Image (cartoon, rainbow, N blue to C red):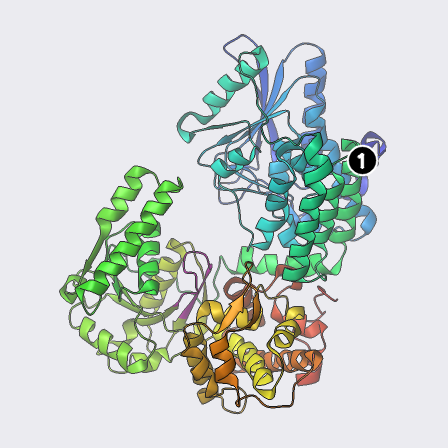
Amino acid sequence: MTNYDEIDFSPIQAPTADEVVTHSRVRDIRLASGRTLALITLDNGRDHTRPNTLGPATLTELGETLAGLRSRAAAGEIQAVGITGKQYIMAAGADLSDISQVGSKANAKLIAQLGHKVLGSLADLGVPSFAFVNGLALGGGLEIALNSTYRTVDASAAAVALPEVFLGIIPGWGGAYLLPNLIGIENALEVVISNPLKQNRMLKPQQAFDYGIFDAIFPASNYLEDSLRWADGVLGGSIKVDRRNEPGKIERLTKWPVAIKVARGMLESRIGTVPKSPYAALELLDKAKSGTKAEGFAREDEALADLVTGDQFAASMYAFDLVQKRAKRPVGAPDKSLAKKVTKVGVLGAGLMASQFALLFLRRLQVPVVITDLDQARVDKGLEYIRDEIAKLEGKGRLDADTANKLRGLLHGTTDKAEYADCDFVIEAVFEEVGVKQQVFGEIEKIIAPDAILATNTSSLSVEEIGEKLAHPERLVGFHFFNPVAVMPLIEIVKTSHTTPEALSTAFVVARGLGKNAVLTADAPGFVVNRLLAKVFGEAARALYEGTPLLTVEKAFEPLGLPMKPFQLIDLVGWKVAAHVQDTMAHAFPDRFYANENFHALAALPQVVEKDKAGRVTGWTKDAQKTLKGAVGDSPASESEILRRVQDGLTQEIRLMLDEGVVPEVQDIDLCLILGAGWPFIDGGASPYLDREGASERVFGGTFHTPVIRGIGG
């Protein structure tokens, strides 16, 4: 087995300009019993907007600190070691800028081994170690806790997760071995593989405690004091720690292999076999059921070294950079000081989408929200939905009783549009037809204040045309959400030739207040995401009406790596919506977008496709088969032909969008597709994928990126 003390880490320890060192500050705390606990506080000296990260210099300093504490423990000076973070943050994991620049596989392995040496020493100090997770704990931040003897968590911590698989790597500092042996294989599969593949889902502290990741959970108001008191009780024996989810012998022999087999089948059917990190993680979790911790750590060293120097991680880092940096500083957004303060929001409509908007505005902005519709029955239905959702959130512990009651008090529904008079921001969620939107805005403009902002949620219509009949079209912006509203992180903010900097700034500030990432687009048909998804839908429909079997069409799209196949996605967004978007794009660009009038016949059906429990399309309904009879040709396309058509079509459209100035740079298109369509991180976004597949060269004789960003299939 590897002896980490004999390894020369100097090749990775030279200071880099990019690493913000997180220091290990130590102070002794005298517990009530008289025992002494040495408390390490991780702190990079920045405010809470720059989280602690774990680069080579940070790990080296922490290792030296822990070695000193081991000596003090041996001398009887301390009876325990605790480790926590600066306010709100334990650590956000490894410093990815350093990891992505390691160069050689040997250096990548050294990164893994240094992490194991340092974090692993938390279990070998001669006295118990306690991790007091007082805030955000991701990746290596959570692995600090897993390597400790005991763990507590602050109930208000922002998130707990092992997101590595989402980034094309694996938990490489103990997580893949320690977690399943702490909380059982099924829970570990959820945390290590399933959650990262669900748009990088995180755990709330209570969920993490329920899984058994933490031994105790305490409220924020007295978190550190409660944790220290609890640690003193554990040290003295008055508090017994119950690891209720630790796997026993029977689970290891029977449940473990079955769970791994089921997970492998799920992965193969959902994402195919090209992505490497989920399968590498699965292999590590499988082998964690037996053998020693040292063997588990050695396996993680090898797996992390392979992945860090592979193509998929390079593509992930491009995508990660877009989401972490570009998304937080939207290109083209006016100065936020120009934004109008929003103290009340109006939502035109009370249907499902409008109700989702209202709920999001209530939860995130916590200002009064009014909804209206044509009659009181529709308004009441919308109000009932919103109140039910608030009750569900309260029941799950995601809202406390006081906040839930406050939100109910801020909500109002009526048929009287006069109540919009004091709204600062009014968004419509009415039928997707220009005339309808013009009519509702025309009515409301007479009521609202002169400086109130109007927003349209249109998915593909011209924002400028919607505002044509307004007396003040300069106050109108496009504010396009994605479904489901609460989950999808993107808002496309659409600027017309009239939109003022004040209106635009307000839209960006509101989007940020809602917890969304906003991208500025020109007022072009379909904007970004729907324009490109319409290309995907159109090529799927074209192949279908040529006579290609449904499941062949679905399978042809697998190499794109999208979270859903085309007809599964159409079923989610709605066949009527998809038909409308397709018509809009085919009308705008008849030579490039496919539309078929029979699509509307399918859209009129109550149910078009049959799906399995996982939501995958398995075939047509009987009604759909009848509708398609006689409308389908007899010239089926092959999977490779369909894939090539969609690759070339996407390439052509992206190139044209850049030429037309729909967005400033191709990075904005990739960002929109990652956030709004779930394009996978390990693919790096659409444009790197199209470069690697040769579509860029075929279509315009060049590439979107020089050098080409490697990734899946790279």
Where the C terminus falls, by quadrant? bottom right
Apparent side of residue 410 relative to residue 62 in the rendered image (left or right): left
Q: Is residue 517 visible?
A: yes
Nearer-the-camera pick, 534 or 657: 534
Question: Disc 1 residue type?
Answer: Glu
Q: Position of residue 442 (x, y in %)?
A: 21, 77
Q: Residue at x 56, y 62 (%)?
A: 612
Predominant SS along the magenta part: loop
Quadrant including the N terminus: top right
* Residue 392, horizontal then vertical, whole percent: 36, 46
Residue at (68, 30) in percent of width and height: 248
Q: Quadrant of residue 484?
A: bottom left
Picture layout, residue 171 above or below residue 506? above
Above or below: residue 586 compared with residue 402: below
What residue is disc 1 on? 295
Please tell me in which quadrant of the rendered image residue 241 appears: top right
From the viewer's perspective, is 250 left or right of 434?
Answer: right
Q: Relative to residue 609, is residue 78 depicted above or below?
A: above
Q: Residues within 10 Å of mark 1 (few under 14, many from 20)?
A: some
Q: Nearer the viewer, residue 316 or 632?
A: 632
- Work out whether residue 283 or residue 403 is closer to the camera in this orientation and state it: 283
Asked which secondary structure carries label 1, the reply is helix
Does the segment drawn in magenta span residue 120? no
Q: Point out the residue furthest to the top here.
A: 34
| Quarter of the figure with residue 462 | bottom left
Percent position of residue 100, x then y: 70, 53
Q: Is residue 412 left or right of residue 83?
A: left
Q: Start and end of the magenta stretch?
A: 480-493
**Residue appearing at x 59%, y 90% in the figure:** 633
Residue 320 rendering spot, x and y as whole percentages: 60, 57
